[in-house]
Image (spheres, rainbow, N blue to C red):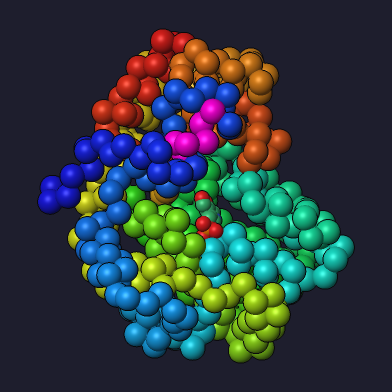
Amino acid sequence: MKYNFDEKINRAGTESVKYDLRDKVFGNPDVIPMWVADMDFRTPDFVREAVINRAKYDVYGYTFREDAYFEAIANWIRRRHQWEVKTEWMTYTPGVVAAFNMAVMGLTKEGDEVIIQPPVYPPFFHAVESHNRKLVLNNLIDTDDGFVMDYELLEKQAKTAKMLILSNPHNPVGRCWTREELQKLGDICMKNNVLVFSDEIHCDLVLPGFKHVPFASICKEFEQHSLTAHAASKTFNLAGMATSTIIIPNDKLRKKYVDFVDSTEINLGNIFGKIATKTAMEQGEEWLQQLLQYIKGNVDYVVDYINKELPKIRVHRSQATYMLWLDFSAYNLDNESLNHKMIFEAGLGLNNGKEFGKVGEQCLRINLACPRSVVKEAMRRMKKVFG
Ligand SMILES: Cc1ncc(COP(=O)(O)O)c(C=O)c1O
């Protein structure tokens, strides 16, 4: 491998959420932090160099996002995901979370129903509830072959809902939705006039053997009735740059969204996020290919370890993202006891599953974007307490 993902980088003392908020979040400053979704790997050198070069320039005044910026992102999406996006369909927000909040506020009304699919990324819940929209839960179904969508329930829910926020691929269960699954979901949404916000922030973290399908790429109808969020932030470890791209092929819908975002004046963006994103999209292929191999190695290590040494934990091998969803229901522990054991006995800081919905009360999410040695130590500790 040309890039070294085994190297341990000391992130403590850098105002890192993952490291420096351990005491506040877990009540134990010494846990191995395997929670918030950023990586412990070095942001690629070519990205850092581009940012450093710009930082050397004398003035950090206002900048705009030039055509070449959008072209770099469009090229990346065309090349990697075979979706013929046009640059004029693109707009930006400081982050994907901001974007789906804007979409809920700008494209639905108070009291409207918005569907999400728990267990799912916690800000999906907040985006609906904090703007006085009605949360409709289309829980995923855990089968022996992995999590699947509940289309039967969705058929009923879609009759009155106005929007669905999709996690494609899905955080936290690591599903890379297939074309057929997305087609089924889309057909139900289109038939009932439910707008789809497809959060595809993890789309470039699809592990070897799987293929991301952008929801909007499936057919013209889906393209015209959806918004897609893309970002380089998860993939290239740039989350602190707060930069994302929202793709809205439908002119009317895009105008409505952009007008609303403009009315909030949050959209200035920042110079470094723009440079980092553009550089990653132009130069990131080889680095990403190696990163994905490494993450797959971590996922395989943990799933194989659990199956052999900790068989009471239910786990499905992730197809995408660097997360694994661990189900501890067989231990019959309540949420508090499970987390207490993990934090204070095992010394591991994982995400509390209950934040991903009530269905996650006996589950935890583990972030495996760290050196293999850390993953191994984490599993050793887990076995000591739960084995
Ligand atoms: C599904 C999903 N959407 C959005 C985000 C965060 O997006 P941003 O940092 O661009 O607001 C995350 C981060 O974990 C995520 O998992």
- Percent from the top left, x then y, of residue 129? 78, 54
Q: Is residue 46 left or right of residue 200?
A: left
- Percent from the top left, x then y, of residue 16? 45, 43
Q: Please say whether residue 173 is one of the residues in the magenta stretch.
A: no
Viewer can see residue 191: no
Q: Could you tell me which residue is drawn at 44 percent across and 32 percent down? A: 33
Farthest residue to the front: give it.
58
Seen from the viewer's position, the closer of residues 192 and 32 is 32
Q: Indicate whether 11 appears above or below 137.
A: above
Q: Is residue 52 left or right of residue 345?
A: left
Q: Which residues are magenta?
A: 18-23
Q: Could you tell me which residue is drawn at 52 percent across and 48 percent down? A: 171
Farthest residue to the left: give it.
2
Q: Indicate whether 30 appears above or below 236.
A: above
Q: How many marks?
A: 0
Q: Could you tell me which residue is drawn at 40 percent across and 63 percent down? A: 232
Q: Is residue 385 left or right of residue 112?
A: left
Instruction: Using the rendered view, name the quadrant where residue 303 is placed.
Output: top left
- Percent from the top left, x then y, of residue 286? 20, 60
Q: Where the C terminus falls, by quadrant? A: top left
Q: Could you tell me which residue is drawn at 64 percent across and 51 percent down? A: 123
Farthest residue to the right: give it.
111
- Percent from the top left, x then y, of residue 59? 37, 77
Q: Indicate whether 206 appears above or below 37.
A: below
Q: Is residue 215 left or right of residue 105?
A: left
Viewer can see residue 204: yes
- Magenta span: predominant SS is helix
Seen from the viewer's position, the closer of residues 260 and 367 is 260
